[in-house]
Amino acid sequence: MTISRLLLSFIRAVSLRAAFVGLMSLTALSLAHAETIVVEGNVRVDATTIQSYVTGQTVEVAKKDLLATGLFQSVEVIKKGDQIIVRVKENNIINRVAFEGTKRLKGEMFDGELQLKPRGSFTQEALDADVARIKEIYARVGRSNVEVTPRVVPLENGKIDVVFKVDEGSKTGVKTIDFVGNNSFSSGRLRDEMQTTQSNFLSWIKTTDVYDPDRLAADAELVRRFYLRHGYADMRVLDTKVDFDAEAGGYRVVISVDEGKQYKVGEIDVESKIAQIDAATLRSRVLLAQGDVYNADLVEKSILGITTEVASRGYAFSQVRPRGDRDQANATIKLSFLVEEGPRVYIERINVRGNTRTRDYVVRREFDIGEGDAYNKVMIDRTERRLKNLGFFKTVRISNEPGSTPDRVIINVDVEDQSTGQFSVGGGYSTAEGVLAEVGVQESNLLGRGQFARIRASTGQWTKGVEFNFTEPYFLERRLQGGIDLYSKESDNTRFAYYSNMKTGATLRLGVPLTEETTVTGRYSLYNNRITVSDPTNVSTAISASEGQNITSAVGYTLDYNTLDNNQNPRNGLMASLKQDVAGLGGDSRYLRTTGDVKYYRELNDSFVGMVRGQSGYIYGSDLRVIDNFFMGPDLVRGFSLAGIGPRDASSNASRNGLGGTTYWGTSTEVSFPLFGLPREAGIKGAVFADAGSVFGYSSSAAVSLVGNDQSVRSSVGAGLLWASPIGPIRFDFAVPVTKNDYDQIQNFRFTAGSVF
């Protein structure tokens, strides 16, 4: 045998021996099927189940897998002779989870939030995690000082009760919100844009001063959008720092911003890469003009307008690419809108997820495009804004994912329902209706169908009534708002005339949105006025002629235009309405009534907001009744009482009787401002105003001693106090007439209050 063969035989023998030794070692560490597995310490868990985790596994793997089940506090695996001994100590089974000391939050509010659950296994890790979770939930409702003490109560058969004793502590709100780097706008003005507010004397009835990191992140975006609307295209939110001040008992928020410079709009260019589309015809869809302050919101609306126009001409795959070229030296932005054919991508499917109450079709109908249509991101973004504006959902998020083929896309709509019902009890006082109490029930998403329904009843010192309203926002499966109003109201007018009026009727409505800002609403009204004369000897003969039942059947419309930045607290924008009604489709009245009202708001600076208002009305008819006329007072010129201006019966026994007029006009200017020393989020503002107007044009076949039927102007100046209170808007005005007639009825003070609490 050669040396090489001897060497090869030696290597082979060594290799076989090494393999044998390794196999024997592995066998020693493994728990063979042939060995007996003995389970000790188990009470509820079947031994066969435990053995299945051990068979064929190493000691360490078997121990790890058994502990991972969460059924055992401890596991010991021992090899003893031909036996594998598994000693376990089972976790306790939870009988119930209870809470003590929870007043602000009830125990059921933690359902689904905690790891420990009845009939589940108890572990210390889960207990510690649940304590932390309870503290986190309390922190989100402004109770960061909460103390949570867990207690385990042993029961029979290895069961336990887990009790969380909670000391809720005092409310820990947001004490201060400060801004760093804001030179163009004050911190107070920026706080107005935020949902989070500072703690103040109203903290006992509000929750917006609770620190919520998600809401604060959304607030930072609101502040950024505010800057973009005012021309600061380079604005950035650098940092949001939140510190808990134990001494003050609340959070201090500091938001750092980099404003950059304010830009104006430079040249505007619309370019079309689609041969059949003339760019010049799309220019009217751009809502900005050269020299305007740059506004990102108007840029987005311009993109939507151009996209809609091009799509209406049959180019479903078109897309509009905006571009802004900054000229740093001149602080201008050149805007370019490029229209071109986009990729041919179709919507394969729209998934609606997370809606537990709202029906799928309520979400889907907000899309202007559907499954099988061309995908258009601008349209999708508009849908997301619409869904958020419905008020049905806490959160709305639309995302995309690839479809079954490269030219298909799947749209996912993730929403989270929120409560939309409301039971209200209200009270208040006004100089028109006296002391007033009201109760009502309202639902803005009736049965998850997106319908609005409300019923309310009121009783007061000088008025009482009941009203029912119902609106279907997608009448006939179209974007039409159909609705009905039923009402009955009794008014005691003996303070300024010797009669009372009971008005009972119904109105059918149909609203059609023309654009995002313009809506036209048609209506048909049928109502009965029942006039009751309280003192026939003093009432005007014109009012006596209207005593009894008077039925009015009228058809009309309202054209609304609204560009306000905020309907509740406007600072910029225009709101205008034109109304016309024709009575005579049966009934006792015959007339054509036209009214108009325009309000324009302009932010004068961080603190002052100016408002200019103009209103007018005219009614035409051959034989008008007194009740058909315009009765104007403080709604036209403050400082005068209800029906306090305009034509009157001058006879000595009926001098209190206002007769109304067929024509009126009025103008108002007002400047509102926050009151010094009060936090802005308190919602209290002051105002100064000046009003002027006139009511005239009375005509009747009834013989009356008529005065005030000329076009003399009444005017007044005054000051007011406005409070957007948690129980509704409250306003107090003091006005002094500047020009008036001797027979006009004066009312210097005017107070309105009330609403829901």
Image (cartoon, rainbow, N blue to C red):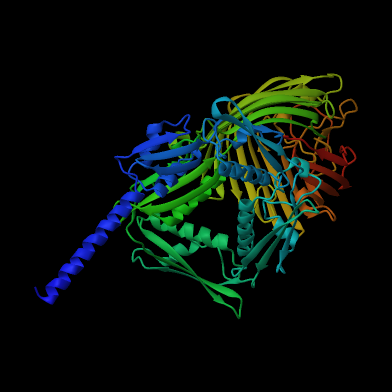
- Badge count: 0
- Residue 409, position in %: x, y? 35, 53
**Where 188 falls versus 120 (above or below)?**
below
Residue 598 visible to the viewer: yes
Instruction: Specify the quadrant of the image occupied by residue 602.
Output: bottom right
Residue 515 visible to the viewer: no
- Going by the image, does 343 lie left or right of 623? left
Please state, as top left, top right, bottom left or bottom right, where the N terminus lies in the image. bottom left
- Going by the image, does 88 lie left or right of 53? right
Please state, as top left, top right, bottom left or bottom right, where the C terminus lies in the image. top right
- Residue 458, position in %: x, y? 73, 26
Determine the residue positioned at 71% across, 24% down. Answer: 465
**Where 218 falls versus 74 (above or below)?**
below
**Where 88 falls versus 435 (above or below)?**
below
Determine the residue positioned at 75% across, 44% down. Answer: 171
Give the residue at the far left of this rendering.
Answer: 1
- Residue 365, position in %: x, y? 45, 41
- Residue 373, position in %: x, y? 35, 50
Give the residue at the far front of this rendering.
Answer: 1
Instruction: Give the camera-side residue of 466 and 243.
Output: 243
